[in-house]
Amino acid sequence: MVLKLHERVRVGVVFKEEGQKIEPKWFLWRGGKKTVKYITYVWREKEGRDTIHKFSVTDGSTLYELSYWQEKLIWFLDTVEMDG
């Protein structure tokens, strides 16, 4: 089952290589903290002037899609893919 959300979330990240590489480590969603166990895929999209950094991540059981809107400096949880 895939939930399409586009909900703002707070994300703990590590910026590496002088800000060129972004690694989400955890995010807060629905009253809980989800720890990123693996980043499975990374890509970028453009919307107007904004660069959107997209991350497919997992906590080991659920797949999430996070997006970081660079111009606005905000994070969204876009989709959640759960079994069942």
Image (spheres, rainbow, N blue to C red):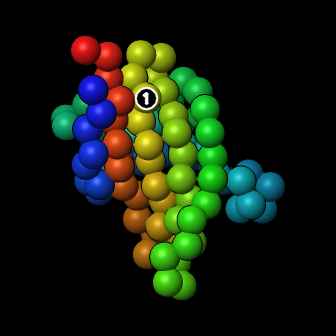
Of 49 and 27, the residue lying toward us: 49
Residue found 25% across the figure and 48% down from its top? 5
Residue 56 pos. (x, y %): 52, 39
* Numbered label tally: 1
Single out the residue that lies furthest toward the bottom: 49
- Label 1 sits on residue: 63
Mark 1 crowd level (few <14, some 14–19, many ≥20, 10 Å Cα):
many
Q: Name the residue at 27% across, 45% down.
A: 4
Q: Residue 47 vs residue 33: left or right?
A: right
Q: Quadrant of the N terminus?
A: top left
Picture quadrant where residue 37 is located? top right
Amino acid carrying label 1: it is Leu
| Placement of 9 over or under 57, stated as above or below | below
Q: Residue furthest right?
A: 17
Instruction: Tell me where residue 28 appears, x and y as whole percent.
Output: 32, 40
Give the residue at x 26% y 53%: 7
